Amino acid sequence: MAENKQKKAKPIRLVFLGPPGSGKGTYAQRIAPRLKITHIAAGEVLREEISAGTELGKRASGYVSKGQLVPDGVVISAIQVRLEKALKETRGFLLDGFPRNMEQALQLEKATAIDVVINLDVPESVIVERLSARRQCEKCEKIYNIKFLKPKKEGICDVCGGKLFQRKDDTPEVIKQRLKIYEEQTAPLIDFYKAKGLLQTVTCTQVDIPPEIMVKEILGVLEKLKII
Ligand code: AMP
């Protein structure tokens, strides 16, 4: 009997780059399940460790609440574990919020190849307006916005019925600090990935653009590059 040689689908390895509030998490939550890849949100990983009170969470907590980057050693090991799991158990990964500086980018290079870096280019005025109205489900982590992406029932998640909360670092003071850190430490990665031929920029200047429109645009880029 002829051996049933099923061709293994090629992995999909994506990175979303962009300032806080650019929509990385919102789009990743919609794209990752469609591509059957694992969404790895660095901030989410850290928040989970913090609320579980783990050693890692204790080390990260002060930095997150001030809007500063958690030391590389702490973040990189946590991400590496999830990367390996994603590649083993699913078709690949969508990294959101990692890498956030040059050292993390170099470590990521050592850990895995990546197929494309989607750079979400969004003006600061849009970011500030979005972040102050952002809410998130405490159970399933789905992201909402009380002005532009409202849940059907106020304060309640459409998907799982969980309660929505406002992140402690979505306050004007901390938002300012996070944007400063983005400019100083993360934005240089745009040129780093451009030089490697991996960067694709998607621009969004409209504060209330429906996520599905941006999702379609990003999927279009991936199709054009024959990544999906
Ligand atoms: P985010 O949910 O991506 O906005 O991240 C929330 C916070 O988690 C950031 O302001 C940082 O304090 C921390 N954080 C997230 N990702 C990283 C990272 N790659 N390196 C260091 N700290 C991070």
Image: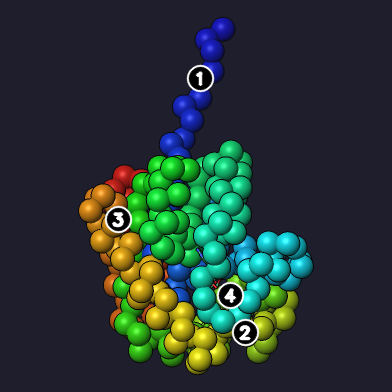
Residue 153 is left or right of residue 118, and the answer is right
Count of numbered marks: 4
Instruction: Quickly name the residue at label 4.
Output: 63
| Marks 1/4: CA–CA distance | 50 Å
Q: Is residue 220 visible?
A: no
Task: Give how far across and how far down residue 32 sits, in percent.
Answer: 51, 56
Instruction: Quickly name the residue at label 3.
Output: 193
Q: Hey, what amino acid is under mark 1?
A: Lys
| Marks 2/4: CA–CA distance | 12 Å
Neighbor class of circle 2 (other Cα within 10 Å; few <14, some 14-19, many 20+) is few
Instruction: Quickly name the residue at label 1.
Output: 5
Look at 54% across and 64% down and name the residue there: 71
Q: Compare marks 1 and 4 and give the one earlier in the sequence.
A: 1
Q: Hey, what amino acid is under mark 4?
A: Tyr
Q: Hey, what amino acid is under mark 2?
A: Lys
Query: Which residue is most to the right?
Result: 53
Instruction: Give 107 or 82, whichever is nearer the viewer.
Output: 107
| Marks 3/4: CA–CA distance | 26 Å
- Can you tell which of label 1 and label 3 is closer to the viewer? 3
Neighbor class of circle 4 (other Cα within 10 Å; few <14, some 14-19, many 20+) is few
